[in-house]
Image (spheres, rainbow, N blue to C red):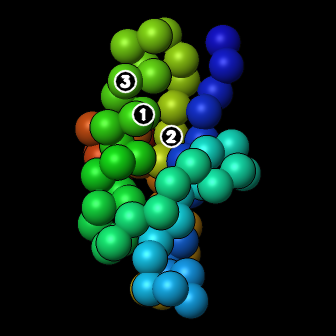
Amino acid sequence: MATVLFDVGNDPLPSGEWSVYRNGVEAGTFASKAAAIAWAAQEAARLQDRALTTSIHIEGVDGVWRVFDASMKAPLT
């Protein structure tokens, strides 16, 4: 089964927009970090409906990357 990873960093681009990377490739830019996260969650849910495994990695202000599923819940460890 293929895995799709979405990454949303803590720092915006020089333009002030936020990037979302899908498997290491920029997939889109958004006006806010919240909009970037919302899009990543929507895309992850859409792909899960196609039986793909997805995860969303979000960098916090503390520099720590955290992993979420499409429902924006941290998976059980």
Do tag 1 and tag 2 residues touch (Cβ < 8 Å)?
yes
**Which kind of residue does numbered mark 1 sit on?**
Ala
In the image, which disc is placed on residue 27? Answer: none
From the viewer's perspective, tell me whether residue 61 is left or right of residue 33: right
Q: CA distance from mark 2 to mark 3?
A: 12 Å
Residue 75, horizontal then vertical, whole percent: 41, 41
Q: Nearer the viewer, residue 2 or 14?
A: 14
Name the one closer to the observer, 17 or 72: 17
Contact, CB < 8 Å: mark 3 with mark 1? yes
Whether 63 is drawn above or below 52: the answer is: below
Q: Secondary structure at mark 1?
A: helix
The correct choice, above or below, for 64 with respect to 46 in the image is: below
Residue 63: % across, % down: 55, 82
Look at mark 1 in the image and give the residue it sits on. 44
* Quadrant of the frame with the N terminus: top right
Mark 2: which secondary structure?
strand
Spatial CA distance of label 3 from label 1 is 5 Å
What mark, if any, has residue 46 been given in the picture? 3
Neighbourhood count class around disc 3 (C-alpha, 10 Å): few under 14, some 14–19, many 20 upward: some
